[in-house]
């Protein structure tokens, strides 16, 4: 099989690595607009098993014809792109008829609802499809949420806690950008949770609660926003309480809340001495040198999903946990391992026929990866050293 990886930043090389070590994969093509990033990716992969399978190609996604031609030459693809580039790329994958795992979240893909509806109608018969948000979160968090809920007769509560943190918290935020890019994952918008069976707005970064993970220690988790499409699942339609919280080292939410209350996370331009300035962009520019990953940095991924409800007429709880760390052998961050490996596994499953066509042009991960597909995903991650612990009472 031939696998396409679009984007060669922090996530792309890990996706390519996961594909190239698979004996069934004959070729992995890594594409990027930046020759420098392609060169860095080549350097990252050159001494690893399967490196001889990898081809590197400069590709501008704004070149529609060339992009579609490249996509049609591959069985499946992974997109590890900034949001703006992803908005251009995933409709091209649908037109090319190539199954495509995109790390971009559905709710921030930036495509207006009427355009999404038009694409649904236009590509309803396409042999290709896009899984949006096929990474760690979104991705594994929702996939595990569905699995745990399916183990109960009734699910009343679903709580998701997940986040990537540096092994050593350092000022000013105790955080490093582990996903890629130069912008901090900070948003000014409200978050959502399920309360009394209804989606309600809550302040983002609010309700921080102490959480602890084996081998990591004490952290905090705060409201990031419950993904509303989870409620489309039959097993979660009766959900009474649902939270989705991001994990960071203690004190992070307080600092970020101050930035938010001061208006420094706003995307609305303000006039500064005759110059239009976006506050969030200034914050990103000022903080990036202090929060970017440097070679000596190491990261940890923390993950816990808990479903609470009833089984056989009795109260029951099901939990999935995972703690993953930077891989000293391959040099991949834990965030790349848990995010990009997931997308690459999804692409290979699709190319092998393990994931059937969902019957619509784009879906979210839990709508496509369940049942035997779930088992395959977890087994493949386990082989790569990303391991989940399941428990219940």
Image (spheres, helix red, strand yellow):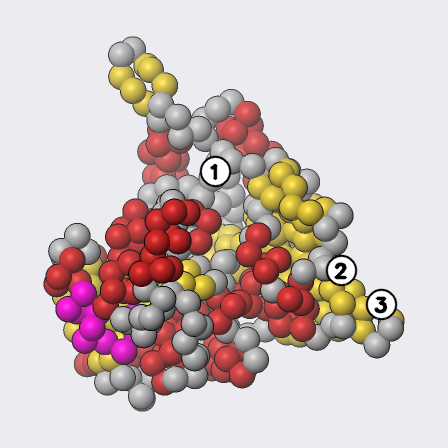
Reading the chain from its start, which is encountered first: label 2 or label 3?
Answer: 2
> Label 3: few (<14), some or many (≥20) within 10 Å?
few
The reply to whether dot 1 and dot 2 touch (C-beta < 8 Å) is: no
Q: Which residue is mark 1?
A: 187
Residue interval drawn in magenta: 68-77
Q: Residue at x 44, y 72 (%)?
A: 358
Q: Residue at x 74, y 72 (%)?
A: 152
Q: Looking at the picture, how far across and down is residue 61, in whole percent? A: 19, 56
Q: Secondary structure at mark 1?
A: loop
Q: Secondary structure at mark 2?
A: strand
Residue 272 location, quadrant: top left
Q: Looking at the picture, how far across and down is residue 224, in whole percent? A: 57, 45
Going by the image, does 70 lie left or right of 116?
left
Determine if the magenta segment contains residue 74. yes
- Image quarter in which the N terminus is found: bottom left
Q: Using the image as rendered, state which of residue 215 and residue 234 is in the foreground.
A: 234
Q: Residue furthest bottom?
A: 23
Q: Using the image as rendered, state which of residue 134 and residue 155 is in the foreground.
A: 155
Q: Nearer the viewer, mark 2 or mark 3?
A: 2
> Label 1: few (<14), some or many (≥20) within 10 Å?
some
Q: Which residue is mark 3?
A: 315
Q: Which residue is mark 2?
A: 156
Is residue 81 positioned above or below 76 on the image? above
Q: Residue at x 27, y 12 (%)?
A: 274
Reading the chain from its start, which is encountered first: label 1 or label 2?
Answer: 2
Q: Nearer the viewer, mark 1 or mark 2?
A: 2
């Amino acid at each position: 099989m031939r696998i396409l990886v679009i984007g060669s930043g922090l996530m792309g090389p890990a996706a390519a690595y996961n594909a190239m070590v698979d004996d069934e994969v004959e070729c992995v093509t890594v594409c990027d607009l930046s020759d420098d990033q392609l060169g860095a990716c080549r350097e990252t992969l050159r001494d690893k098993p399967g490196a001889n399978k990898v081809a590197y190609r400069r590709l501008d996604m704004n070149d529609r014809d060339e992009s579609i031609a490249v996509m049609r030459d591959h069985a499946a693809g992974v997109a590890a792109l900034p949001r703006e580039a992803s908005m251009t790329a995933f409709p091209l994958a649908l037109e090319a008829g190539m199954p495509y795992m995109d790390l971009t979240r559905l709710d921030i893909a930036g495509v207006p609802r009427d355009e999404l509806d038009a694409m649904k109608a236009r590509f309803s018969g396409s042999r290709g499809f896009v899984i949006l948000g096929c990474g760690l979160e979104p991705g594994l968090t929702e996939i595990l949420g569905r699995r745990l809920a399916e183990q109960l007769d009734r699910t009343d509560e679903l709580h998701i806690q997940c986040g990537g943190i540096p092994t050593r918290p350092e000022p000013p935020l105790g955080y490093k950008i582990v996903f890629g890019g130069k912008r901090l994952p900070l948003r000014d918008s409200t978050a959502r949770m399920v309360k009394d069976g209804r989606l309600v707005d809550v302040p983002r970064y609010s309700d921080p609660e102490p959480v602890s993970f084996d081998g990591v220690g004490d952290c905090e988790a705060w409201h990031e926003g419950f993904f509303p499409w989870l409620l489309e699942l039959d097993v979660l339609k009766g959900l009474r309480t649902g939270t989705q919280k991001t994990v960071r080292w203690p004190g992070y939410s307080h600092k970020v809340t101050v930035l938010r209350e001061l208006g420094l996370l706003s995307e609305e331009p303000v006039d500064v001495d005759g110059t239009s300035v976006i506050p969030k962009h200034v914050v990103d520019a000022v903080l990036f040198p202090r929060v970017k990953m440097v070679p000596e940095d190491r990261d940890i991924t923390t993950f816990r999903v808990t479903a609470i409800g009833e089984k056989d007429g009795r109260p029951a709880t099901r939990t999935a946990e995972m703690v993953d760390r930077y891989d000293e052998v391959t040099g991949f961050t834990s965030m790349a391992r848990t995010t990009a490996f997931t997308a690459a596994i999804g692409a290979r499953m699709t190319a092998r026929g393990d994931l059937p066509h969902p019957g619509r042009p784009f879906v979210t991960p839990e709508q496509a990866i369940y049942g035997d597909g779930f088992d395959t995903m977890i087994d493949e991650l386990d082989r790569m050293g990303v391991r989940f612990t399941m428990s219940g009472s």
